[in-house]
Image: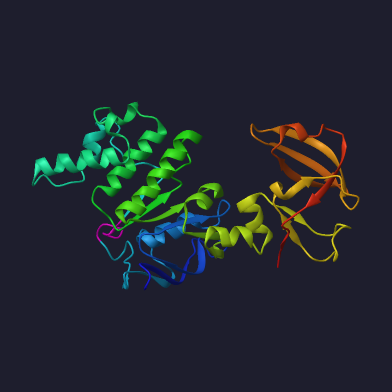
Amino acid sequence: MSPLINLQNVSKNYSELLHSGVSDVNLEITSSSIVSIVGESGSGKTTLLKLIYGYLLPDEGEVFFSGTRVLGPSEKLIPGHDDMKMVTQELTLNLYARVFDNISSLLANTDLEVKEKLTLQTMEFLRIEHLAYKKIVELSGGEQQRVAIARAVITEPKVLLLDEPFSQIDTILKKELRDDIERLSRFLGITVVMVSHDPSDALALSDQIVVMREGKVERKGHPKEIYNDPQSAYVAKLLGKANILQGFSFLANASEKFAVYPQDVLLCQSDEAISAKVKRVHFNGFYSEVCFLVEDKPLIAYIFDSVDVPEKGSSVSLKLRNLKKLV
């Protein structure tokens, strides 16, 4: 099946002196999938989103939608592809208008009965029908985010582009909004491409993850594939806060580099275990984050049994499982 969106050798640089933007990006996005673009600040995530939408014109390469080149802002009177909608961090809502009016204003007045029905259906789908007659200024950040998404999808776009959709909402609302975005894709067949600063959202939600680093695609693929085989220290630390191991005496080859996720650092009583000392303990509810010192280097572990959490300054034995070899 041919991809819905196809980026071929796309580059966009804002400065000739400093790296900024993206370089030589090749990417295929299939219809009705959820794709997350992740990476550290300044890695080119938002630039990539704007190139897909047509807000920016590539310096090199081309972006295609259903086999047709996406036009840039200098080639189109109103920038942005007609079959896509983009929700940015700066929500373009009328703060002193009602929620209902903010959403329904995207539809024509040719049939007012249909307009009202579709607006109510869209609000119900995103669980904001109870907010219909509130003004935007009276809503929380998470509620405003839902209204912005409702405005975007009411015109039935084929692609929804989201720039940091979870950045201004708390944990409970994040879970609900994550579920709503998944339903938009699965039940309405909308392709979702989102930028996320929290890799856990991308891992939980996506069919494909695109890891950006300094404007280039470091890795791309299914979340499980990349998480279980990160290949680089950058990806391992970004997706799982992994410990990077190199030069330890317990490694067979001191020059080789491995990653181990905190949940794979375990307490044990084996004679062949690794000696460690507890540097600090942070309680996090259902688990504790413990920083050990091993050969004077920090090693982070997540311990899920509160009974077994050692005290600061105590000496313990550790074992490591599921080491990931890095290139």
Whether residue 180 is visible, yes or no, is yes
Residue positioned most to the front: 270
Q: State the image coordinates of residue 296 (x, y, percent, origin top left).
A: 87, 47
The question of residue 27 being in magenta is answered with no
Vertical comparison of 72 with 38: above or below? below
Residue at the limit of the structure toward the left, as seen here: 110
Using residue 61 as the reference point, say whether residue 282 is left or right of it.
right
Place of residue 277 in the rendered image (x, y in percent of width and height, measured from the top left):
86, 40
Quarter of the figure with residue 148: top left
Between residue 249 and residue 224, name the one nearer to us.
Answer: 224
- The residue furthest right is 271
Tell me: residue 295, above or below residue 249.
above
Picture quarter containing residue 5? bottom left
Q: Is any atom of residue 213 visible in this view?
A: no
Give me the residue at 33% from left, 28% from top: 137
Residue 168 rendering spot, x and y as whole percentages: 46, 37
Quarter where residue 124 is shown: top left
Residue 14 drawn above or below residue 99: below
Magenta span contains residue 82: yes
Q: Count the marks: how many? A: 0
Q: Looking at the rendering, in which quadrant would you find the C terminus?
A: bottom right
Majority secondary structure in the magenta region:
loop
State the extent of the magenta-drawn residues as a range: 77-84
Residue sitting nearer the eye, 154 or 77? 154
Seen at 71% across and 47% down, the residue is 262
Does 74 sit left or right of 61 as displayed? left
**Image colouring:** rainbow
| Quarter of the figure that contains the N terminus | bottom left
116 relative position to 26: left or right: left
